[in-house]
Amino acid sequence: METPATRQAGPDRLSDRGRTARLVATALGLLLLFGGTIFGTDDDFPFGPFRMFATTNRWDEPISIARAEVLLDSGERVELTPANSGVRRAEVEGQLERFKAEPQRLAGLADAWRAHHPGGSSVRSVAVYLRHHELSRRGPTGHYYDEQVATWDA
Amino acid sequence: MGRLSAAGDWLVAPVPRARIAIFRTIVYLFVALDVTVITGWVRAHTGMPGDLYRPLLVARLLHLPTPGRALILTVFWVLLAAALAAATGRAHRLLGWTVFALYFEWMIIAMSYGKVDHDRFGLLVALAVLPTAGAARHTDQTLTERGGWALRMTQFGVVATYFLAAWAKLRFGGPEWLTGATLMRAVVRRGTFLADLLVQVPYLMILSQFGIMAFELLSPVVFVLNEKWRVRLVAFWYAFHVMVFATITISFAPHLAAMSSFLPLERALARVRRPTWGMLRYAGVVSPGDAPEDRSSIWRRLRSPSTPSKRQ
């Protein structure tokens, strides 16, 4: 591979085969990438569309942010976070429709909480809320209301 | 045919091996940082039950198992060890492919619970091509075409992340993306103190949305700039991400690591390695009478004192 001769004989050049293989790989990669961007969905990762922050909101409608909460036997309500359960807010938003249609799936979030708190107070129920923030052209007005979109009792 | 051949030459335009070696170190050290800190939450998924796992297409095609505690922890530790070893540049193929396969699995786990991120496409490309870039030492200035192709592909990945993100904004958000409450949503979700101040400036968010769209659509320009302006444009991109982080705490860190593929890294390293005047004086190799501008020649003399003609 790397003989002293190649090291001194100027640039390390590709063989014709190596060069062709790379050009073909480049073309294939670009094809997948553009195909994913034009027709694909998130499911096609890593060749899906680059859609983070690709959606938008209207100025005259509230901005809705989801969160999941567990209600413990102790009466305490805790919002699920990556630190206390491994649950990310974006993941709750990503599966929101599924939780609405099949609320029993929320049992999974209770499991995630329990795995991080063995021996802790047991979970009475899990709920997913949307908080609707009112907007003005100068930012959120500070007014909001919560809507419970799914709930499950242990 | 001539044009195709010229395009081929451009795709494999040679770079110094030292640049590959340094880029490897950056990328593999970043992977170690990423799995421990930035996407450390993937490890927290060990408590997630299988029914919240929504395997991506690639996971279904490869019949990857539903991640459980044992799988996630095994991937974590082997990946961490392999990435740290790969950062040295040794066994670049074996370690490189190992890191690529395990990091890809790490990403599939990360993205299979309802949220897919697109800030790591450039890094994934870098990991896929670095094993093909050939052996490289941090000081070897020999030019390499296989290394050139690896960097070019990573650069494609970085520019695609901008250019195709603009495309996705038009596809999913439509033209209203430019004039809607797009950034406002990000600020409400995760804005900082600075962002809360900035949203109060009339029309600043909309102006920023036009600015983001323009710079993303124009990003391929980086390929026709000379080195001086290329480095300036990349510096602007880095500055943009600093601003994004300061306002909505989104770091795009993997993308930033991949973006170093545009920089003349070997020259940066050479500059860092050249001792300062103070170091030379402390080492006793210069006397008070020497002029500071002789620093480079003193350094050259020090490095090859006995064989001054060997490099000719």
Image: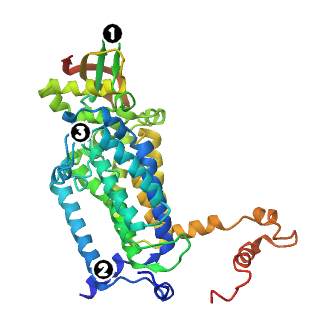
Name the residue: 41% across, 39% down.
B248
Q: Which residue is mark 3?
A: B114
Q: Would residue A115 be found to the left or right of residue B297 on screen?
A: left
Inter-mark Cα distance, 1 to 2: 66 Å
Discs 3, 1: same chain: no
Q: Which mark is residue A75?
A: 1
Inter-mark Cα distance, 3 to 1: 29 Å
SS type, badge 2: helix
Q: For residue A78, what is the image quadrant? A: top left
- Residue neighbourhood size for the residue with mark 3, other residues' Cα within 10 Å, grouped as few (<14), some (14–19), many (≥20): many
Q: Are marks 1 and 2 in contact (CB under 8 Å)?
A: no
SS type, badge 3: loop
Residue type at mark 3?
Gly
Q: Would residue A71 be found to the left or right of residue B281 on screen?
A: left
Name the residue: 21% across, 38% down.
B53
- Residue neighbourhood size for the residue with mark 2, other residues' Cα within 10 Å, grouped as few (<14), some (14–19), many (≥20): few
Residue type at mark 1?
Gly
At which x and y percent is residue B264?
Answer: 51, 69
- Chain letter of the residue beneath label 1 in the structure image: A
Q: Which residue is mark 2?
A: A18
Residue type at mark 2?
Gly
